[in-house]
Image: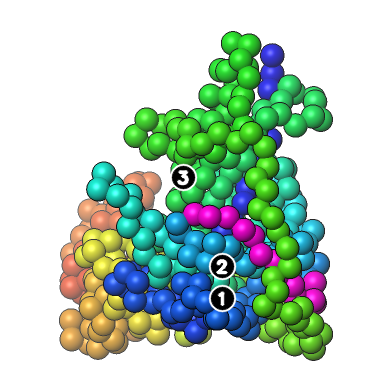
Amino acid sequence: MKYETVIGIEIHCELKTKTKMFSSAPVAFGEVANTCVNEVDLGHPGTLPCVNKEAVKLAIKAATALKCEIDPLVKFDRKNYYYSDLPKGFQITQQFHPIGKGGCIHIETKDGVEKDIRINRIHMEEDTAKQFHSDAGTLIDFNRAGTPLIEIVSEPDIRNGAEAAAYVEKLRTLLLYLGVSDVKMEEGSMRCDVNVSIREAGSDTFGTKTEVKNLNSISNVQKAIDAEVERQIALVSKGEKVVQATRRYDETQKTTILMRKKEGDVDYKFFPEPNIPPIRLDAAWIKDIQEHMEELPDERKARYMKENGLKEYDASVLVANRDLGDFFDAVCEHTKNFKKAANWVIVELPAALNKDNIKFANNPCEPKHLAAMINMVEAGEISGKQAKVVFEEIMKGKDPKTVVEEKGMKQMSDTGELLAMVTSVLDANPQSIEDFKNGKDRAVGFLVGQVMKASKGQANPALTNKLIQEELKKR
């Protein structure tokens, strides 16, 4: 029997704000435990929440980019449950009135499959504290409690792990470009829960789903889905039933592990948050946010291909790495040789950084220096081979023009000076002239090499070749 996989994804994304969703406590990662917290986050009696305006702004940007319908009336609800990572005993969320509904995002897998994934909703809420389990007990760090979140819920339009990975990657890139979040999955600022079920191919009835929680990398999203699908198919093939449950992905065993069973939907006793009255957003404020949004990834890719003349692959690489793309844009402010600039930025720059174990944030190469070096090659002032040497020096922060002068690398492009050198080399190599007349084209290469040797590598290779060809025809 053939089966079809049905996947929906819930993504929790921490917003890039300075303070928390409903308090003035700072948002920070890696600080000493329980130092970025206040009375509101801890749920002390008598404290009241105050909505973070910047968080609402970032949520509007995300909803707009995902083509969602934005609700100008912001309402919050109270979700009641009693876990140790929730100090108040409830979470403030948007169960009934999400800020964004009904969007979509276009994806393309590595195999070239393209499709639109519908977005069910985007809603704002607060994050929980972080628990650390050990044999001795459980420790809790409340620094994360109250951090602003948006939860992005997809429709069950995803059909395999590759599509899921492409969806998460596209969404991650989009949110990064918008400045909505730093989307560092390894730090937990973007977390994925996937709902997976299988059904007979051609059926429109949903199967029993399992939820695989807290996937912390795009690679693991795909691996976890593939492993869970394999597990479910094996069960059904043996006549057994898939049980609704929450599971986790074990990287070592490469399978999903049961965390807890679900008999049905949990009753969280939702009701309107009594301490936050409905907030009517000003239409002009929303419009201003939307009109001043950052350039989106697809827009940047289209610009690279149309205005810079890059091939789709190069444009995609620059878009996928925001730092690389920003650096390329900076280089292009000083040169019109966009294709060569892209090659240096995509290939040579990362290789040099990796070689010296330098993070991109500490990149010593200045965009204007790289552009100047590219312009010198195009102008025939240095050769491509010499550019490699110059590049090593500008990776130390040096100006390429200074490097060329200090090393005496400037190319000879004066026709009269080169012609005299070519004539001398031809006079000294009559056999090569004879070989050329006998159809041996490699004689030209030999003669070019002799001129380069005589000029100590400073002769313009292209011009040298041209002059030699012209002089040989005269003899």
Image quadrant containing the N terminus: top right
Q: Which residue is mark 3?
A: 219
Q: Nearer the viewer, residue 52 or 267?
A: 267
Q: Nearer the viewer, residue 464 or 205?
A: 205
Q: CA distance from mark 2 to mark 3?
A: 27 Å
> Compared with residue 383, is residue 246 higher up or lower down, i.e. above or below?
above
Determine the secondary structure under disc 2.
strand
Q: Which residue is mark 2?
A: 126
Residue 253 locus on image (x, y percent): 37, 30
Taking the magenta stretch, the answer to whether it contains residue 78 is: yes
Q: Which residue is mark 1?
A: 21
Determine the secondary structure under disc 3.
helix
Residue ID at (73%, 48%):
155
Determine the secondary structure under disc 1.
loop
Q: Amino acid at mark 1?
A: Met
Residue 76 locus on image (x, y percent): 70, 70
Taking the magenta stretch, the answer to whether it contains residue 193 is: no
Residue farthest to the top?
238
Residue density around tag 3, few if under 14, some if 14–19, many if 20 or more, within 10 Å: some
Q: Are the residues at dot 2 and dot 1 in contact (C-beta closer than 8 Å)?
A: yes
Specify the segment rendered in magenta: 71-83
Q: CA distance from mark 2 to mark 1?
A: 6 Å
Q: Are the residues at dot 2 and dot 3 in contact (C-beta closer than 8 Å)?
A: no
